[in-house]
């Protein structure tokens, strides 16, 4: 085998994903490995696409958004459209993530306050029971 292709096992090891994940992305037509009977050989293009898919998922992009961005690569405008659309989606997802973080920070602060109150109640009642 050449270094231009990787087996499903090599892809799984390199990207820390399961064979099921790779088959899922293939079924969704996000990856298109070379098929030799039952064997799948992933090209450099597949590796680059998988890297972008995993990064997009980590950033909260949907598979449909990722598909649309990957499809824009083939437009004949030196990827201006792809980069612009990626930037717009990234701004949207960043705003959503920051809003979620703010909500989470507030929930954490409230939970800490409740736990502090609970600890005070426990200490007070233990003191009453002992004394």
Image (cartoon, rainbow, N blue to C red):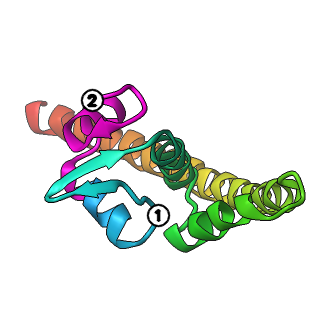
Q: Secondary structure at mark 2?
A: loop
- Which of the two labelled residues, at mark 2 and mark 1, occupies the earlier sequence position? 2
Q: Give me the C-alpha separation between circle 2 and circle 1.
A: 23 Å
Left or right for 59, reference 75: left
Of discs 2 and 1, which sits in the foreground?
Answer: 2
Image quadrant containing the C terminus:
top left
Image quadrant containing the N terminus:
top left
Seen from the viewer's position, the closer of residues 18 and 47 is: 47
> Is 9 placed above or below 34 here?
above
Left or right for 113, reference 76: left
Q: Secondary structure at mark 1?
A: loop
**Label drawn at residue 94:** none
Seen from the viewer's position, the closer of residues 114 and 21 is: 21
Q: Is residue 31 magenta?
A: no
User: Horizontal and vertical percent for residue 12?
Assistant: 26, 39
Residue drawn at x 20%, y 50% is: 19
Mark 1, Cα crowd under 10 Å, few <14 / some 14-19 / many 20+, is many
Res. 88 image quadrant = bottom right
Residue drawn at x 58%, y 63% is: 66
* Magenta residues (range): 1-20
> Is 61 placed above or below 8 here?
below
Q: Is residue 5 magenta?
A: yes
Mark 2, Cα crowd under 10 Å, few <14 / some 14-19 / many 20+, is few
Left or right for 64, reference 27: right
User: Horizontal and vertical percent for residue 41?
Assistant: 30, 46
Residue at the left extreme of this rendering: 130
**Disc 1 target residue:** 30
Left or right for 14, reference 92: left
**Disc 2 target residue:** 1
> Is 50 placed above or below 64 here?
above
User: Horizontal and vertical percent for residue 99?
Assistant: 68, 58
């Amino acid at each position: 085998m050449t270094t231009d292709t990787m087996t499903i096992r090599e892809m799984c090891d390199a990207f820390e994903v399961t064979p099921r994940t790779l088959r899922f992305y293939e079924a969704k037509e996000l990856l298109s490995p070379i098929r030799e009977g039952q064997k799948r050989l992933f090209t450099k293009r597949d590796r680059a696409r998988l890297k972008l898919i995993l990064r997009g998922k980590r950033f909260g992009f949907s598979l449909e958004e990722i598909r649309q961005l990957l499809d824009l690569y083939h437009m004949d405008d030196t990827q201006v459209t792809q980069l612009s659309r990626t930037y717009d989606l990234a701004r949207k997802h960043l705003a959503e993530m920051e809003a979620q973080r703010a909500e989470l920070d507030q929930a954490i602060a409230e939970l800490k306050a409740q736990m502090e109150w609970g600890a005070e109640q426990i200490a007070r009642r233990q003191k009453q029971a002992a004394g």
